[in-house]
Image (cartoon, grey):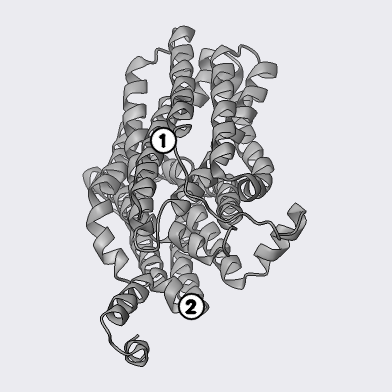
């Protein structure tokens, strides 16, 4: 990595932390703000959450093409300005007709930030440093969300609309501050697709022709559906209904998840960097299967309430361990599967898969968890084992340099030392 790339990467990481910090201020309190503080009711609050997902699904197919054609930085700056306007609009909105468009603008801006920042990380890293860069991104995102949520919780007052207006104003300020920070980034020159299909349809056809990427997207959908899609819907509903978990314990469980990520992220990185990527993902499936079994014990076992609480908190902690293993694995794999100049398109496609899983996951998991406790646990144990199966199957389609990038680095070092290339290949 050159000095210029290192300087750009530091600003990108600052940007990730600032955006997560701003989101942490408002995301946990959005439902309460719309339904109770503004008095617009549960239905409008539910529509606001749905609008976030729909807006993301609409803009992401176009975001990838824009990143490929224009570069990630201009797209990121436009997304940040849109997100800031949406946040300000939400803070000032007093009716359903004003809160829904503001939510759509904020949701669209947030959705486009993800693939744009991911593509910037790809452009500013090498194969040797990419896993560590994405691990740092995930670490800072969780740290920013946690700190933002903690500070935001001490600022809000459900009896004062002005306290929520302040929160949304701070969020908008974070996005605008990020515009100033990212505008100073000097991105390395990266390939642009001059000979690519001129239509979005053509670029998507090219992506869908990559069988390994299609398999990774299927695997990604199952990952996000079985984990993130259950955090704040199905799993929390199951905890309350089946395990008798209090709302304060839910907060403790979420804190345990964040703490595990913060503590384990760099501890597991050395192992992840030396293992096959698909085997790491397969191991995550097994870890999450154990997590769902712990949740099953919490709600379906016959132990004490203290044991049920410990098992439920352990479920969230085990999910955090799996997330720490995935962050330096999946995103770099998406980048390595992308042809030269297509990283933006591939990142956007994977973000679209994530949004679909996050939209469908709560709709399926919530009702199932609230009424059919045992089938809910069995279903997601099987989904977790499905992650293991799909990961091992994907490994058979990947080239060695994609599944084991550390071997390629070792081969280059040995070759420079004068060992015959045939010997290196035989050892690999």
State the image coordinates of residue 338 (x, y, percent, origin top left). 56, 63
**Horizontal and vertical percent position of residue 406:** 33, 71
Residue name at image x 48 percent, y 58 percent: 223
* Numbered circle sitting on residue 273: none
Few, some or many residues within 10 Å of mark 2 (<14, 14–19, 20+): few
Q: Is 255 positioned to the left or the right of 333 in the image?
A: left
> Which image quarter is the N terminus in?
bottom left
Q: Which image quarter holds the C terminus?
A: bottom left
In the image, 355 versus 369, the foreground residue is 355
Against 274, residue 258 (above or below) is above
Residue nearest the viewer, comparing 356 with 123 = 123
Residue 413's place in the image compared with 28, above or below, is below
Q: Is residue 82 visible?
A: yes
Residue 244, visible in the rendered structure: no
Number of labelled discs? 2
Residue designated by label 1: 15
Is 66 situated left or right of 376 in this image? Answer: right
According to the picture, the residue beneath numbered tag 2 turns out to be 399
The structure residue drawn at horizontal position 28% and vertical position 52%, both measured from the top left corner, is: 265
Q: Which of the 4 image quarters holds residue 167?
A: top left
């Amino acid at each position: 990595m050159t000095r210029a790339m290192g300087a750009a990467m530091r600003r990108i990481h600052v940007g990730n932390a600032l955006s997560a910090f701003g989101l942490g201020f408002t995301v946990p309190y959005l439902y309460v703000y719309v339904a109770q503080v503004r008095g617009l009711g549960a239905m409008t609050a539910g529509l606001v959450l749905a609008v976030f997902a729909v807006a993301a699904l609409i803009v992401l197919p176009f975001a990838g093409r824009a990143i490929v054609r224009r570069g990630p930085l201009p797209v990121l700056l436009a997304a940040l300005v849109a997100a800031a306007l949406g946040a300000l609009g939400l803070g000032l909105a007093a009716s359903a007709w004003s809160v829904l468009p503001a939510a759509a603008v904020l949701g669209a801006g947030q959705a486009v930030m993800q693939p744009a920042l991911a593509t910037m990380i790809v452009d500013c890293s090498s194969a040797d440093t990419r896993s560590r860069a994405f691990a740092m991104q995930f670490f800072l995102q969780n740290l920013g969300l946690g700190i933002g949520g903690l500070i935001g919780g001490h600022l809000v007052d459900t009896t004062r609309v002005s306290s929520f207006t302040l929160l949304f104003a701070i969020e908008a300020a974070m996005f605008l501050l990020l515009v100033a920070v990212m505008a100073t980034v000097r991105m390395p020159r990266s390939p642009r697709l001059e000979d690519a299909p001129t239509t979005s349809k053509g670029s998507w056809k090219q992506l869908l022709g990559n069988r390994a990427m299609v398999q990774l997207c299927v695997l990604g959908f199952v990952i996000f559906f079985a984990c993130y899609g259950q955090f704040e819907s199905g799993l929390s509903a199951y905890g309350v209904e089946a395990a008798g978990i209090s709302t304060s314990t839910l907060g403790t469980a979420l804190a345990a998840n964040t703490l595990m990520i913060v503590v384990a992220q760099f501890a597991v990185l050395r192992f992840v960097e030396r293992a096959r990527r698909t085997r790491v993902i397969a191991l995550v499936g097994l870890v999450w299967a154990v997590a769902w079994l712990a949740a099953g014990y919490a709600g379906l076992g016959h132990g004490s309430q203290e044991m049920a609480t410990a098992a439920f908190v352990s479920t969230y902690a085990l999910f955090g361990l799996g997330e720490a293993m995935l962050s330096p694995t999946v995103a770099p794999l998406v980048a390595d599967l992308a042809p030269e100049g297509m990283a933006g398109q591939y990142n956007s496609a994977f973000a679209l898969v994530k949004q679909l899983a996050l939209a469908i996951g709560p709709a399926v998991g919530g009702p199932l968890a609230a009424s059919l406790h045992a089938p809910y646990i069995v279903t997601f144990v099987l989904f977790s084992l499905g992650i293991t199966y799909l990961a091992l199957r994907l490994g058979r389609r990947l080239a060695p340099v994609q599944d084991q990038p550390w071997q390629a680095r070792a081969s280059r070092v040995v070759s420079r030392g004068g060992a015959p290339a045939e010997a290196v290949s035989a050892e690999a």
